[in-house]
Amino acid sequence: MRRRGADWDAAVARWRTLASDEGATYDKEIVIDANTLEPMVTYGTNPGMGLPISGTIPNPADESDPAAARALTRALEYMDLHAGDSIIGRPVNTVFIGSCTNGRISDLRLAANVLKGQRVAKGVRVMVVPGSADVKRQAEREGLDTIFRDAGADWREAGCSMCIAMNGDQLAPGEYAISTSNRNFEGRQGKGGRTFLASPLTAAATALTGVIADPRTLPGLSR
Amino acid sequence: MAAPKVGTFTTGLVPLPAENVDTDQIVPARYLKVVDKAGLADALFHDWRFEADGTKKNPPFVIDEPRYAGHGILVAGDNFGTGSSREHAPWALGAFGIKAILSTSFADIFKSNALKNGILPIVLPAPLHASLMQIAKEDLAARVTIDLASATMTTPDGATHKFPIDAFSQKMLLEGLDELDYIRTQINKIEAHEAAHPGSINTLQPNAPR
C-alpha cells in the first residue's frame, strides 16, 4: 500500500478538518487511564471473560446475576480452570500470533522485539501469521521473518490460520492456546481446544516460557 | 437462487434453555467450507449432538429427541446467535427445519442473517418467553401459529400476541424477494438518479474540480 503523493496529502488535509468541534458534548463519555491498565487475558469462552494479567480466575459464587454465574461455571468447566487460580503461569501448547485483529506490521515488530535472539520454549508450537500479504512483504523487508524463524517459530502465509481453525491449524481436545485473535468460543480453535486471548506482546512473552507470562517482566520491556 | 417466502405456519416447540448460544456452537467453524446448504443440517449444534466418532450422543441433544421431531420453533435463551458473523448459522437451522426462534434477544448479525434466510427471530417479553419455554418442555402436543402478514403469534392458550419485525424484512419475506429482486423493482428510480449524477466523484477531495 502506498500512502504518499499529492492526492494522499490533500486527503489527509481534508480529513484533518473533520475533528470534533471545541467544546462538543457527547451522550456518554468514558475515560480510561492507560497508566492503570495491565495486559489483559481471557480465561473463559467469550471475549468479555477477561482479566488483568496479574488477576485471578473469578468465582461464579460472586456473580449476582444467575445467568452470568451459570455461564461462568460452564466456561471454567470447559477451560478446566478454577476460581482463585492465577492466570500467569498457565501452560500452553500453542502460541498463535496473527489474525486480522493483531497481525499488523506494528504487532509483528513488537513480537519480534521480544523473540529476537531468543528461543521459544521446548514443546510449544509457535505460529506467526501476518494479517495480510502486504504486511507479510513489509515484515520480510524488515527481516522479521528471520527473527521469528531463528527463534523457532513458524513464519506463515497471511490468512486466518488458528483464528478459525478451518485448515489444519487446530488444537487437539484439551489443549491450550494463547492467541492474538479475538474469538474464544468453545471449540473455536478445534473441537475441545481452549483459548486464552491476549496481545501480541503477551503471546510472545508466553512463547519464550511456555506458560502465560507478563511481558512487562521481560528485560528491556519493563517501564 | 429463489428467496425464501414466509407466510403462516403452525408447528411445535423445541426448548433450548441456554443463554448466549454463539455461532461457533450453532455451526462449528470447520463446517464453513460447506457450500451445499442442505448438507448443513448435520452441522447444526454439531459438537453438542455428536460424539467424537460421529455417532449421536446418548441421551441425544434436545433437537434430536424423537419427541421433538418435526417441531419447527426453537425456544432459546437470551442473546441467541452471539459471536462470529456466519450465514451458515441460519442456513443450518433452516436445513434442519427450524422456521422461527423465540428468545428475549438476538445478536444483531445473526438476526439479520436469519431474516434474509427465511427464519424468524422473534423477540418476546420475558414472562411470555418463560411461559413458552415451560410449555415447550412439558406439553409436546402444544402448537404455535405464526402469521407474518399480521406479525402475530397464536399461543396454545389461544391468545394472539403481536411481535416486532421491521417492515422491510416483513415485506421481503412475504413477497419472497431478496435484495437484488427488490433493487430491480426500483430500476426506474435508479436509472433516473444515474442520469442526473456525475460520471465520477473524487471522494478524497470532494470539492476538487473534475
Image: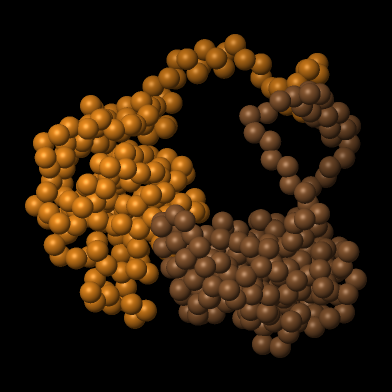
Chain colours: A brown, B orange
User: Is A192 placed left or right of B144 in the picture?
Assistant: right
Q: Height in image: A95 above or below A11?
A: below
Q: Quadrant of the C terminus of chain B?
A: top right
User: Is B63 placed left or right of A85 in the picture?
Assistant: left
The answer, for residue A84, to whether it is visible in the render is yes
The residue at 21%/36% (across/down) is B153
Foreground: B112 or B144?
A: B144
Q: Height in image: B89 above or below B195?
A: below
Residue B61: give x, y in percent of width and height: 27, 67
Q: Which residue lies furthest to the bottom in this view?
A: A122
Give the total number of marks visible in the rendering: 0
Residue A219: give x, y in percent of width and height: 88, 75
User: Is A46 placed left or right of B54 in the picture?
Assistant: right
Foreground: B6 or A118?
A: A118
Foreground: B128 or B30?
A: B128
For residue A55, what is the image quadrant?
bottom right
The answer, for residue B97, to whether it is visible in the render is no
For residue B36, what is the image quadrant?
bottom left
The residue at 44%/20% (across/down) is B187
The residue at 58%/70% (across/down) is A57
Residue B160: give x, y in percent of width and height: 17, 32
Q: Height in image: A171 above or below B92?
A: below
User: Is B151 placed left or right of A103 in the picture?
Assistant: left
